[in-house]
């Protein structure tokens, strides 16, 4: 009888250790699921932020479209905005699809976690049932005492006593684990319901956006048909505006070339002054030779360079700061969409017509202001052939150009700061469009503004 009880005791002690190890493994698995969920949650948060941003952009283009609709005749500007909105709508649908995929992954992970918890709960309950049955068989305190006193020596008696103590503690732990597992399971099931509801809402939103996209594409096709009927008139207007733009661009290029020339001459004068100072200084001949050689290098550099304009420490520091902010510069208007890209590109609706843009066109809302994209100094304020004004700001070796302004708030030589308002953008009442033309130059070299402003 003693031998049988000893065997039973050893088996039950092994079960206790085995159960504890199994619970540790299951806990690790659940932690892994939680970790995966955490990564998915990060992705979901990014997608939700992006979705909110796209929705705001669509709302802005809607406002622009409402302004253009005041003119009953379809305009090219209206078509450009429509195309932009369709692109944003497609981007939104893609974003929603990505969100759905993340939710599907979360649902799969949660379902696996629920299955694991169900298995664990069943295992815990089965073990607890066995413990209750074993306890009922040996519930007599007399038989427990007899089992302990029947030990062969003191060590064995101590081990048997510890066994009953551990057994009692383990039963309490088992009850607690069952309750905790049930709580986790309830929480996971609730989580799963929320995820499935979110999935349903996203699918519904996706369908709604697809319907809006189809409607917008139909409106765009109708606008194209209407514009094709007035192609000759559009071409005539385009040629006139193109001629005005070319004349203005020549004025801008002349001012920029003059700024570059003055900056390079100033740099050469500084280099020559440094040369004379070096020659007069009572230093070793070797040092004098090195200084003279250095100034000659600087002089040649500024004579040959097409894009370097300045050499003062302050200007070089400003240039470096401007360069380091590439891709992060604020937009030259608080809100807007790029309606014409940099460089030569085909006209959106007039076949065979190539547009060459020295910067980008930003369509914005009526009453919008132009603002400086970086700290600098106003190099020039000029009037174009159409009466609209232009502001040119210098940022060390760089210049930014803001065209099609109705009024200007700054003057030549004035220091400006990032995001400072420099003028109001002109609104063409004929087709209700408000467009800011924006350029970036590095010396005489044109830069693509889209690569410099924040996305």
Image: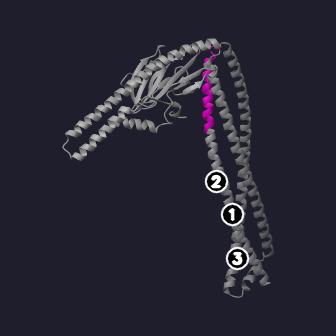
The magenta span reads 49-73
* Of callouts 3 and 2, the N-terminal one: 2
**Mark 3 touches mark 1? (CB < 8 Å):** no
At 52% from the left and 15% from the top, the residue drawn is 243
Residue pointed to by mark 2: 35
At 63% from the left and 49% from the top, the residue drawn is 39
Q: Is residue 211 above or below residue 239?
A: below
Residue pointed to by mark 3: 163
Which quarter of the image is occupied by the N terminus?
A: bottom right
Q: Position of residue 165 (x, y in %)?
A: 69, 74
Q: Which mark is residue 207?
A: none
**Residue 292 in sight from this viewpoint:** yes
**Mark 3 touches mark 2? (CB < 8 Å):** no
Q: Is residue 50 left or right of residue 170?
A: left
* Of callouts 3 and 1, the N-terminal one: 1
Q: Position of residue 114 (x, y in %)?
A: 74, 54
Which secondary structure class fits the magenta region best?
A: helix
Residue pointed to by mark 1: 25
């Amino acid at each position: 009888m003693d031998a049988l009880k000893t065997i039973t005791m050893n088996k039950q002690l092994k079960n206790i250790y085995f159960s504890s190890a199994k619970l540790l493994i299951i806990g690790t698995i659940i932690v892994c699921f939680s970790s995966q969920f955490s990564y998915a949650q990060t992705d979901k948060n990014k997608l939700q932020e992006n979705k909110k941003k796209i929705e705001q952009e669509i709302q802005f283009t809607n406002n622009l479209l409402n302004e253009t609709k005041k003119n009953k005749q379809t305009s090219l500007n209206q078509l450009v905005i429509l195309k932009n909105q369709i692109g944003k709508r497609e981007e939104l649908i893609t974003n929603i699809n990505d969100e759905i995929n993340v939710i599907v992954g979360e649902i799969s992970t949660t379902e696996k976690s629920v299955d694991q918890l169900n298995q664990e709960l069943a295992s815990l309950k089965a073990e607890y049932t066995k413990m209750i049955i074993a306890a009922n068989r040996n519930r007599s305190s007399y038989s427990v005492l007899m089992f302990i006193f029947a030990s062969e020596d003191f060590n064995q008696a101590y081990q048997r006593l510890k066994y009953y103590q551990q057994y009692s503690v383990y039963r309490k732990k088992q009850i607690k684990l069952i309750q905790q597992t049930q709580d986790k399971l309830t929480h996971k099931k609730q989580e799963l319901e929320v995820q499935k509801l979110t999935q349903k809402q996203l699918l519904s939103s996706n369908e709604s956006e697809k319907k809006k996209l189809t409607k917008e594409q139909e409106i765009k096709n109708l606008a194209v048909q209407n514009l094709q009927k007035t192609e000759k008139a559009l071409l005539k207007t385009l040629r006139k505006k193109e001629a005005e733009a070319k004349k203005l661009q020549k004025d801008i290029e002349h001012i920029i070339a003059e700024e570059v020339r003055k900056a390079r001459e100033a740099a050469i004068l500084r280099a020559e002054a440094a040369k004379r100072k070096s020659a007069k200084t009572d230093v070793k001949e070797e040092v004098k030779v090195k200084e003279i050689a250095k100034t000659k290098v600087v002089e040649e550099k500024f004579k040959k360079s097409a894009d370097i304009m300045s050499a003062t420490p302050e200007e070089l520091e400003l240039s470096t700061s401007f360069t380091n902010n590439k891709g992060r510069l604020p937009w030259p208007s608080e809100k807007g969409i790029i309606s014409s890209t940099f460089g030569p590109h085909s006209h959106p609706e007039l076949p065979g017509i190539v547009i060459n843009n020295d910067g980008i066109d930003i369509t914005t809302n009526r009453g919008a202001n132009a603002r400086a994209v970086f700290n600098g100094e106003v190099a020039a304020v000029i009037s174009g052939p159409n009466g609209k004004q232009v502001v040119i700001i210098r940022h060390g070796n760089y210049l930014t150009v803001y065209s099609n302004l109705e009024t200007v708030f700054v003057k030549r030589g004035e220091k400006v700061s990032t995001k400072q308002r420099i003028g109001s953008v002109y609104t063409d009442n004929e087709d209700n469009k408000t467009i800011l033309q924006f350029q970036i130059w590095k010396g005489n070299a044109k830069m693509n503004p889209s690569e410099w402003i924040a996305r």
